[in-house]
Image: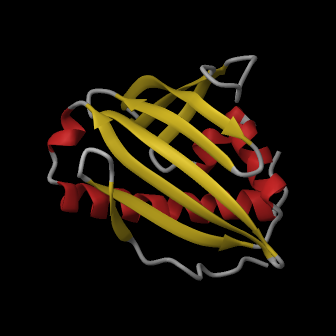
Amino acid sequence: MHRPCRFGRWRGRSSQQGAAVAVVIRTIAAEPEAVFRVLANGWLYPAWVVGAARMRGVDDAWPEEQSALHHSFGSWPFLLNDKTVSLEWDPPRRARMRARGWPIGEAEVIVEVKRRPDGCVVRLTEDAVEGPGRLVPGVIRTIGITIRNRETLRRLAFLAEGGGR
């Protein structure tokens, strides 16, 4: 059974550059290892990442650092090809990625997972780090990313709780 989000509010945090970043937290009724199984299966990326439309390829080394997921984002007929690169892989605690989505730009995404007696708590932190997306005022950018990432964590929860492989 799907558990509702216990900590669904968004809150801005300051990054090292002083800009707001989007942080979304969700309780998931699955072990942290189940969450990382979903993250490790690159072919599932469009099933949980809002905006990713399809996979074009997954590096054999995924999710090792510097390996990549080759995906498309948008909607047909306006699909753009790009990639997401793994920057840090420390299961079942933390993963850090650089998601490219040009011409919008690039974002750093951090997934942190903490075990709880009834499953785990997942914190998804994201902000634009390159490109035109950085020009959007921090407060507006944070609100937009937060709305998107609430749904992203909802989808990740469905896959982890359902045993997505």
Residue 13 in percent (x, y) is at 34, 62
Residue 8 in percent (x, y) is at 50, 77
State the colouring used for the structure image.
secondary structure
Q: Residue at x 77, y 50 (%)?
A: 92
Q: Residue at x 53, y 47 (%)?
A: 110
Above or below for 74 versus 125 = above
Q: Residue at x 32, y 42 (%)?
A: 128
Q: Which of the image's four quarters has the N terminus?
A: bottom right
Residue 81 placement, left or right of 27: left
Above or below for 32 versus 131 = below
Q: Is residue 75 visible?
A: no
Q: Which of the image's four quarters has the C terminus?
A: top right
Q: Residue at x 48, y 65 (%)?
A: 24
Residue 33 placement, left or right of 9: right
Residue 161 in percent (x, y) is at 79, 65
**Front-most of residues 8 and 103:** 8
Residue 86 in percent (x, y) is at 59, 29
Residue 88 placement, left or right of 152: right
Residue 122 placement, left or right of 91: left
**Front-most of residues 88 and 137:** 88
